[in-house]
Image (cartoon, rainbow, N blue to C red):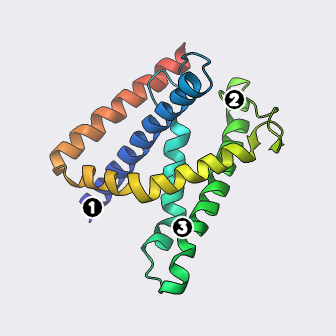
C-alpha cells in the first residue's frame, strides 16, 4: 500500500513538472512568435518551467477526473466537454488570481503581463481572453496530455520512476534555492 502511494506521488510530481515545462514553452511561444517581444525566461525560476501550469494541471485533475471517468448516457455525454471547459476556465482563472497576489506579496510583482489593456479584466491580474485560452488548455491537458503522461509514467519501472522523479525533484530544489539566493 505504501509503495502504491509513493508511486502515485512520484507520477503526480512528474505530471506537474511536464505541465510546467509545456506551460513555459507555451509562454515563450506567445512571447517570441505571436507577440514578437523577443525571448525572456517566462518562469519564476531559472529553469524552463512555469510552476503555475503544473499546479493548474493537478487542480484540473483533482476537480474533473471523476467527471471525465463517469459513464454518461448519450443525451448528456456531449455536455461533459462543455462543463470541463467552463470549469477549467474558472479554476485556471482563480489560480492565476491567487498566484498574482501571492507573487506580489513575495516578490513585489507578478511575472506575467498585466491585463490592463484587455477589455474585460479584474485589477489587470486576470482577464476574459486569457481565461478562455486557459480553458482550452485545460481541456487539452485533460483529454490529450493527461493520457500521454499516464502512458509515459506507466512505462517506467519502479526503479526508473524513483530515479527520474528523484533527479527531477533535486533539480527543482536546487533551482528554487538558487532563485531565492540570487
Q: Calculate the distance from the C-alpha at mark 1 to the C-alpha at mark 2.
A: 37 Å
User: What is the x, y in percent for residue 21?
Assistant: 43, 35
**Residue under the point 28% across and 32% down:** 167
Q: Quadrant of the N terminus?
A: bottom left
**11 vs 125, nearest the viewer:** 125
User: What is the x, y in percent for residue 35?
Assistant: 62, 25
Q: Calculate the distance from the C-alpha at mark 3 to the C-alpha at mark 2.
A: 31 Å
**166 vs 133, nearest the viewer:** 133
Q: Quadrant of residue 147?
A: bottom left
Given contact means CB atoms under 8 Å apart, are the residues at marks 1 and 2 in contact? no
**Residue under the point 60% across and 20% down:** 36
The residue labelled by disc 3 is: 81
Crowd class of label 2 (few under 14; some 14 to 19; many from 20; radius 10 Å): some
Q: Earlier in the sequence, mark 1 or mark 2?
A: 1
Q: Earlier in the sequence, mark 3 or mark 2?
A: 3
Q: Nearer the viewer, mark 3 or mark 2?
A: 3
**Residue under the point 49% across and 51% down:** 57
Q: Quadrant of the C terminus?
A: top right
- Badge 1 element: helix
Q: Earlier in the sequence, mark 3 or mark 1?
A: 1
The residue labelled by disc 1 is: 4
- Badge 3 element: helix
The residue labelled by disc 2 is: 110
**29 vs 71, nearest the viewer:** 29
**Residue under the point 65% across and 50% down:** 132
Amino acid at each position: 500500500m505504501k509503495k502504491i502511494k509513493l508511486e502515485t506521488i512520484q507520477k503526480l510530481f512528474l505530471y506537474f513538472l511536464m505541465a510546467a515545462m509545456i506551460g513555459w514553452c507555451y509562454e515563450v511561444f506567445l512571447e517570441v512568435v505571436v507577440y514578437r517581444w523577443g525571448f525572456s525566461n517566462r518562469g519564476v525560476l531559472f529553469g524552463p518551467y512555469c510552476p503555475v501550469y503544473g499546479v493548474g494541471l493537478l487542480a484540473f485533475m483533482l476537480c474533473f477526473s471523476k467527471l471525465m471517468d463517469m459513464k454518461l448516457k448519450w443525451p448528456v455525454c456531449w455536455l461533459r466537454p462543455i462543463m470541463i471547459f467552463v470549469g477549467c476556465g474558472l479554476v485556471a482563472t482563480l489560480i492565476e488570481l491567487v498566484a498574482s497576489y501571492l507573487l506580489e506579496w513575495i516578490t513585489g510583482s507578478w511575472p506575467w503581463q498585466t491585463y490592463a489593456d484587455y477589455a474585460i479584466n479584474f485589477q489587470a491580474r486576470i482577464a476574459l481572453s486569457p481565461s478562455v485560452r486557459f480553458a482550452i488548455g485545460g481541456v487539452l491537458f485533460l483529454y490529450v496530455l493527461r493520457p500521454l503522461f499516464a502512458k509515459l509514467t506507466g512505462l517506467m519501472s519502479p526503479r526508473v520512476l524513483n530515479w527520474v522523479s528523484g533527479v527531477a525533484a533535486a533539480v527543482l530544489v536546487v533551482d528554487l534555492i538558487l532563485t531565492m539566493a540570487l
